Amino acid sequence: IPQLMAREDPRIREALERYANGDLEAIDELQELVLLNHEARAKALRRKTAAELRFVATALSDASAKGKRRTRDALDAWQLAAQYDPDYFWQWMTIQNLADDIEAFEVAEHALAQATRLAETPHEKAWVISRYPNAKALANVSLGQTSGKKPEEAALEIYRRQYELDPS
């Protein structure tokens, strides 16, 4: 009980007090609050871990840019960070770029699909569009001028088609 009382969420303390005063229903609420609190702390820890991994990945990307042939290592580090925080848009753009550099096109395609899913701001959407090989066709996709496909599906089709025609 002291560990629960030390939690910052006042709802946990209130539920404990109600239980101490004989309210047995407070136990159900307490269980739900403890689980929610745990999930929030776990998510924060995953995001912190991902941020630290992105720092390492950035250093590896820097080494790769300086000709140290660490692109695969950098890509692996970025992918590991994405496992801890899959909702960070910019890491997917970086993964896509690194994967394209080493011709890991399936990885690049997956990363671009994730970035497309996560893009919210006009700036992010512009970055996604710029990564597709046929940006003009993708602009038409984003304006809804396609045959009823979702924009991300049509854009991925363009991406796949481009690499089938010109894998360089």
Image (cartoon, helix red, strand yellow):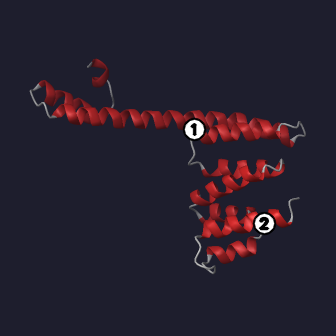
Mark 2 lies on residue: 133
Residue identifier under label 1: 84
Disc 2 marks a residue whose amino acid type is Pro
- Amino acid beneath label 1: Tyr
The quadrant of the rendering that contains the C terminus is bottom right
The quarter of the displayed image where residue 6 is located: top left
Q: Is residue 97 above or below residue 12?
A: below
Name the side, left or right, on which 116 lies relative to 37: right
Q: Secondary structure at mark 2?
A: loop
State yes or no: discs 2 and 1 in contact (Cβ < 8 Å). no
The earlier-in-sequence mark between 2 and 1 is 1
Q: Which mark is residue 7?
A: none
Dot 1 falls on a residue whose secondary structure is helix
Can residue 12 be seen in this snapshot?
yes
CA gap, disc 2 and disc 1: 29 Å
The answer to which quarter of the image holds residue 153 is: bottom right
Q: Residues within 10 Å of mark 2 (few under 14, many from 20)?
A: some
